[in-house]
Image (tube, rainbow, N blue to C red):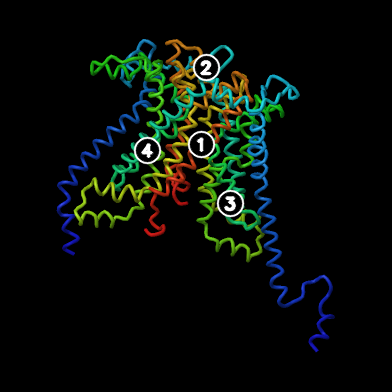
Amino acid sequence: MTTTTAPTTAAPARGRLSGVVRIVVLVAVLAVVLYPLLWVLGSSLKSPTELGRNISIWPTDVTWSNYTEGWNFSESLSFGRFFLNSTLIALATVVANGVSCLVTAYAFARLRFRGRGVWFAVMIGTLLLPGHVLVIPQYVLFEAFGWVDSPLPLIIPKLLATEAFFVFLMVQFMRGIPRDLDDAARIDGCTPYGVFRHVILPLSRPALVTTAIFSFIWTWNDFFTQLVYLPSPDSYTVPIGLRLFIDSGGQTSIGPMLAMSVLSLAPVFLFFLAFQRFLVQGINTTGLKG
Amino acid sequence: MAVSTAPPTRPAGRPRPGAPARTRPADARRRAEGRAGYVFLTPWLLGLMAITAVPMLLSLYLSFTDFDVLSDWDQINWVGFANYERMFTQDPVFWKSVGVTLTFALIAVPLKLAAALGVAMLLNRERRGTGLFRALFYLPSLLGGSVALALVWRAIFSRDGSFNAFLDVFGITGQPWVNDPDWALETLMVLAIWQFGAPMVIFLAGLKQVPAELYEAAEVDGAGPVRRFWHITLPMLSPVIFFNLVLETINGFQGFTSAYVVSDGTGGPVGSTMLYTLHLYTQGFTEFKMGYASALAWVFLLAIGAITALFFSTGRFWVHYADGDGK
C-alpha cells in the first residue's frame, strides 16, 4: 500500500505545473488550427474595403452583400444550381455506397465460398491503388458510353462497391457481431439471405451511418473527378463553381469567394457537429482493430 | 430382416433416414452458402472488372500509343516505348514534378505526423475537455481537402493576406507567398500539416493501448520522460506510426486540389507547385495527350508500389508488435 501511494503524493506539485503547460500548448495549437476557419467566417461578412491586409477575424460592420453577390455568380450561373447538383450527387453516392458496400462486406465477413481469401486480398489491394492511375482509361470508357457531362461516372462506380475503404470498414464491423446470432437465425430456418436481412442489416446500422457520413463528406469535397466529368456549367458542382472565382480574379471577388467558401464548408461542419463520435470511431475501426 | 424391409420403406426421391440424411442438408447448406457468397459479391466483382481491371489494362495499352480523345479509335498508333522515353529524356516538367512531389511528401508527411503525435501525447490523459480538443483538432482533416479551404489558403497567404498582416506586427515585411516560386509549395505543406487531426486520432487510440505498468515500472527504475518516450512510447506505438506513415505518404503523393487551386491549374509560379498528379491531369485533360498521360500514370503506380514495398520491407527492422515473436 505504501509503495503505491508514495509516487502519487509526490506528483501533485509537478503534475499541476505540467498540467498548466499542457493546457497552454494545447490552446495555442488550437488557436492556430481554428484561425483560418474563424477568419473565413468573419471575413465573409466584411466589406471590400475592410478585406485588405489585416489579421482581424471580426468584421467591423457586418455586410451580407458578399453572400448575395456570390450566390448570383453571373447572369446565367447561380450557386443555387451548384448546391443542388452537389447535393444530388452526394446523396446518390451515400445510397450507392451504403447498399453495395454492405452487401459486399457481408459476403467477405460472413459467408464461406471458394476463393474468398483471394478476392479479399484483391479488395485490400484496390484500397492502396491510387485513383489517378485509372482516371484516363475510365474517362475513355465513360466517354464511349456517352456518360461524360452527366453524374453517371460519379455514381455508377459507387453502386459497384469500388470504395474499398467502406467495404473494409464494414467487414471489420461485422466481424464484431456475434456469430451465435447467425447460427440462431439459421436454426430458425433462415437462408444466407434471411440472415443478412434479419440479423446483419439491422445490426450494421452504426457502420452504415459512418459510411454515409464519410461518403457524403468525401463526395462533397471531391474536386478531381468532378472536374474531369462535369465540363459544362449547368452540371457544375460547388467545388467546380468555386473555381470560377479564381478565373475571374481581382480583389473585388474575394468577398463573394469567401462567402461561398463558407457556405460550401457549412454542410460538412454540420455533419461534424452532429456525428463527431461516429467519425472518430470510424477512423479507429479501420485504423487499428485489424 | 432389416435389410429386406429397407427398400420398400424408402420412397424414391426422398432422403433416406440415417447417416446420409444428416450430412446431405449440411452439404446443401454449404453449397447454398457458396452460391449466396457469389450472389452478394456480384456488384463488387462487376466493379472490379469494369471499373478497375479493364481500365488498368486499357491504360497499360494506351501508354504505348499516341492516343488522344479527339481522334478516332482507328487512328491510334502503337508507338512502343516512345512515351516512356520522352518522359525520362525530353520532358523537363516530368522531372520537375517528381522533385516537387518528393519534396512535398518528404517534408510535409514527417512534420504532419510529428504534430499529430505531439498533440496526441498532450491529449492522452483523460481530463475534462479532452473530447472537445480532440474533435476540434480533427475538424481540419474533414475540411482541408476542399476547394474552399485551398481558396482560403490562397487568400491568407497572398500579398495582402492576413499572414503578412501578422508578420507586420513583428516588423517583418512579408511577401506574396503563394505567388513566390520559393514559397508556394511551402504554403501547400502548411495546409497539409494543418490537417494533422486524422493521424492524431489514430495515435490517440494507439497510446491508449500502451500498458500503464510499463511507464510505472520505468519510473520506478528512474527513467525520465525523455527515456520513457524513446524506450516505451515509440516502440509500443511503432505499428501505429507505421500505419500512419504508409497511409499519409501515399496520400501525400496524391495531393492535387490545393496545388490546382493555388496555381490556377498551372502548377506555377514557375512550376513550383507542379505536383505529379497535376502534371498527369494537364497532359491528359488539357493537352489531351492521353497516351502519354497513361504512361505517366503507370510510372506513378510503379513508384507508389515501390515505395510501399520499401516501407514494408524496412518495417521489419523498426516495427515492434507486442504480441509478436520473441517480444
Residue A107: tell me if it is visible: yes
For discs 4 and 2, the disc positioned in front in the rendered view:
4
The residue at which mark 2 appears reads as A244
Q: Identify the disc placed on residue B304.
A: 1
Q: Mark 1: few, some, or many residues within 10 Å (few <14, many ≥20)? A: some
Q: Which residue is mark 4?
A: B113
In front of the other: label 3 or label 4?
4
Helix, strand or loop at label 3? It is helix
From the top left corner, tell me how far across and down residue A141 is, in percent.
Answer: 68, 30
The three-letter amino acid code for the residue at tag 3 is: Leu
**Left or right relative to A285: residue A167:** right
Q: Amino acid at mark 1?
A: Ile
Give the mark toward the camera: 3 or 1: 1
Looking at the rendered structure, whether the residues under marks 3 and 1 are on a common chain is answered as no
Residue A56 in the image, given as x and y percentages of width and height: 31, 20
Is disc 4 on the same chain as disc 3? no
Location of residue A208 with respect to B3 vertically, above or below: above
Which mark, residue A201? 3
Q: Which chain is indicated by disc 2?
A: A
Q: Amino acid at mark 2?
A: Leu
